[in-house]
Amino acid sequence: MELSEKTLSSEILYQGKIVTLRKDTARLEDGREALREVVEHPGGVCVLPLEPDGTTYTVRQFRYPFGRVVEELPAGKLDGPEDHRLAAARELSEEIGAQAVEWIYLGSLMMSPGFCTEVLHMYLARDLRHGQQHLDEGEFLTVRRRPFEELVEQVMTGKCQDAKTAALVLKAKEYLRREAGGIQ
């Protein structure tokens, strides 16, 4: 079995500032046709800024779809075909006012591959230089400095529900464990 589907037709239903909604008709392996709804998204970045003493920074902001404040790592969307490393540096600077000397790429995630094209790139940022925060117009958030291990515990207990933050925190924890000489 090849496990593929062929697009027969495609129609854009909505084109917004961040996403495009598309309805496709696809031919399945058995010859039948099926509708596929696809949210096109330019992708994004998430950054875990880490100080030598083991503290990190999160941001708290109101997330409209959930109607509440969410605590998460600095993150943002790519601007078109933007290099994701440069986008990570931009978001770190905008949201917490920091620049990093060391950038460690920890991979990417398909955020919700059943219907969305968003790919998120994850970075561990170290050797931080602090300056002024400069948020985008209409962006409101507060910065919180906290121990990295406290953030790990919040991910493990489910208190932190933001998927990109949870994934990056756990990837960074494993990276740091291996870097310190832990079992491979």
Image: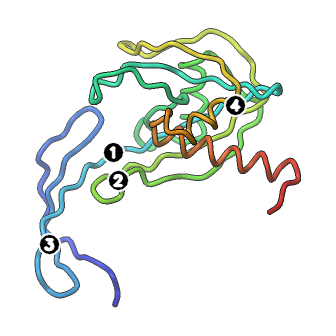
Q: Quadrant of residue 5?
A: bottom left
Q: Which residue is mark 4?
A: 148
Q: Residue 153: where, in percent of width, then height?
A: 62, 36
Q: Which residue is mark 2?
A: 117
Q: CA distance from mark 1 to mark 3?
A: 21 Å
Q: Which residue is mark 1?
A: 41
Q: Nearer the viewer, residue 176 or 32?
A: 176
Could you tell me the amino acid type at mark 2? Thr
Label placed on residue 141:
none
For discs 4 and 3, the disc positioned in front in the rendered view: 4
* Label located before the other in sequence (2 or 4): 2
User: Which quadrant, please, contains the C terminus?
Assistant: bottom right
Give the amino acid at mark 1. Answer: His
Residue holding disc 3: 8
Q: Are marks 1 and 3 in contact (CB under 8 Å)?
A: no
Residue found at the far top of this picture? 132
